[in-house]
């Protein structure tokens, strides 16, 4: 891309070149079937030598049109703005580090002193368009740009909007940030169904929260993990729907919570979410390639939590689910997991989901190998059923909620069935 040369001033190239052999490690959960990915490097510290670029928070004011762009809000990402002509602009969206999974997240506001139409061309550095723009006047109610507003042009994609004095929010997806997680967790805590604690801090010293549901003395643990990757907001919606169902005041959920401890770490990458990163944490590190190396405080916090709650207390990990988003719905599983075989917990759950939603969610299994993806590490460490649940980027809120609710009901039924209340835990 034509903006590529400008990168040189912001990235330490000598160090970056050292990291290039590890480009494959940064391949997406989003674009490459997991089975084809290269395993994590044996010496991952070398992959951390590229320097992450933190975007400058600022306004871009263009007096000729009375137009202002801004990235001074949470989850915003906007790296440059150029005026091409009257009412005609180009915005540059750049990743936090290269090489990177091409998931160009963006977010900014645009306003004009007097109502006027604007054309905004999107220019992505190190990536191509993935997210259809979502628009909002108040940052709360969102709608997708219409096909008339957003189209592929010769130089990329361009959005046409009516700008005015009230800033228009233009985001890759409706953002779900720190405040939304807090509100959601507060509601569960206030209902008395969840207990909240801090398990550690992010690399930028933000608290990493955990919610615990169910019986604190239970031997069985269901682990729910989310938002390792900042743009993956549909995964967060699914996680919230899933946990809400576990927390429901239904006979099934009450019975399940009586016999299980549910541990939820819903936001593992708060720094990346605040920064509007495409993939990594504040250091540009892909957290879902750090399970094993544990170079980052976020992954270490969960590793240590599991040591305390599982190893030290003699509990068993009954099931672990890590929510993500990608182009379509996929379950990534571990090929050698016994629970994938007929009669196993994971097989029954996936069969249940696929029978309920035929053709909707495919399973992609691969060997756990020495991969530093969470589910592979968790399988090797705890021999538990583990799954990465990739939710489609474009799956609508209502369908997400229905899928997540069914997924939770199914996992509760299967785990209750697999674990007699008085006997020892069954083999997975
Ligand atoms: Zn992901």
Image (cartoon, rainbow, N blue to C red):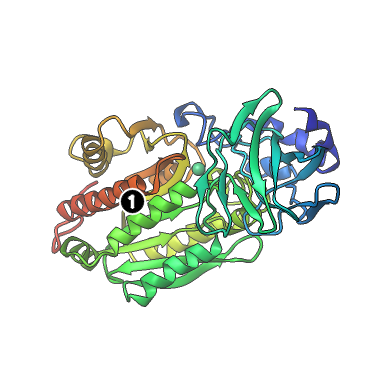
The image shows residue 9, relative to residue 189, as above or below, that is above
The image shows residue 146, relative to residue 303, as above or below, that is above
Q: Nearer the viewer, residue 189 or 234?
A: 234
**Label 1 belongs to which residue?**
401
Q: Nearer the viewer, residue 284 or 122?
A: 122
Quarter of the image for residue 131 reads top right
Residue at image location 39% in from the left, 57% down from the top = 240
Q: Residues within 10 Å of mark 1 (few under 14, many from 20)?
A: many
Lateral position of residue 227 relative to residue 195, left or right: right
Residue 384 shows in this picture = no
Lateral position of residue 250 relative to residue 149, left or right: left
Residue that extends furthest to the top in the rendered view of this protein: 154
Q: Residue 423, image x and y in percent?
A: 14, 60
Q: Residue 310, image x and y in percent?
A: 37, 61
Q: Secondary structure at mark 1?
A: helix
The image shows residue 272, relative to residue 187, as above or below, that is above
Residue at image location 49% in from the left, 63% down from the top = 180
Lateral position of residue 401 relative to residue 53, left or right: left
Residue at image location 21% in from the left, 35% down from the top = 355
The image shows residue 229, relative to residue 113, as above or below, that is above
Residue that extends furthest to the front in the rendered view of this protein: 115
């Amino acid at each position: 891309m034509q903006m590529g040369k400008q990168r040189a001033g912001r990235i330490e190239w000598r160090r970056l070149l050292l990291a290039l052999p590890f480009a494959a490690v940064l391949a997406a959960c989003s674009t490459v079937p997991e089975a084809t990915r290269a395993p994590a490097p044996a010496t991952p510290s070398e992959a951390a030598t590229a320097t992450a670029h933190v975007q400058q928070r600022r306004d871009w004011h263009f007096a000729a049109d009375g137009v202002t762009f801004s990235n001074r809000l949470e989850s915003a990402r906007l790296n440059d703005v150029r005026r091409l002509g009257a009412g005609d602009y180009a915005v540059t969206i750049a990743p936090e580090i290269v090489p990177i999974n091409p998931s160009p997240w963006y977010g900014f506001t645009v306003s004009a002193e007097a109502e006027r139409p604007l054309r905004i061309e999107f220019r992505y550095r190190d990536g191509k368009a993935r997210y259809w723009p979502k628009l909002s006047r108040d940052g709360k109610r969102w709608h997708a740009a219409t096909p008339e507003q957003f189209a592929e042009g010769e130089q990329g994609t361009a959005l046409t909007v009516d700008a005015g004095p009230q800033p228009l929010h233009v985001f890759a997806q409706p953002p779900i940030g720190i405040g939304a997680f807090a509100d959601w967790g507060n509601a569960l805590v206030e209902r008395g169904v969840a207990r909240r604690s801090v398990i550690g801090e992010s690399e930028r010293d933000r608290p990493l929260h955990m919610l615990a549901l169910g019986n604190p003395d239970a031997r069985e643990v269901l682990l729910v993990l989310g938002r390792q990757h900042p743009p993956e907001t549909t995964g967060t919606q699914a996680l919230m729907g899933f946990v809400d169902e576990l927390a429901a005041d239904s006979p099934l959920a009450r019975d399940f919570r009586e016999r299980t401890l549910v541990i939820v770490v819903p936001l593992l990458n708060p720094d990346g979410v605040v920064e509007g990163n495409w993939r990594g944490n504040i250091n540009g590190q892909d957290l879902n390639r750090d399970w094993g190396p544990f170079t980052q405080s976020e992954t270490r916090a969960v590793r240590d939590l599991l040591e305390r709650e599982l190893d030290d207390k003699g509990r068993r990990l009954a099931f672990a689910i890590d929510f993500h988003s990608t182009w379509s719905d996929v379950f990534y599983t571990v090929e050698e997991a016994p629970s994938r075989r007929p009669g196993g917990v994971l097989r029954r759950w996936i069969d249940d989901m696929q029978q309920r939603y035929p053709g909707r969610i495919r399973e992609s299994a691969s060997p756990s190998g020495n991969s530093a993806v969470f589910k592979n590490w968790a399988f090797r460490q705890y021999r538990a059923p583990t799954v990465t649940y990739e939710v489609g980027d474009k799956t609508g809120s209502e369908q997400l909620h229905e899928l997540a609710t069914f997924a939770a009901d199914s996992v509760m039924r299967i785990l209750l069935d697999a674990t007699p209340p008085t006997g020892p835990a069954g083999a997975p």
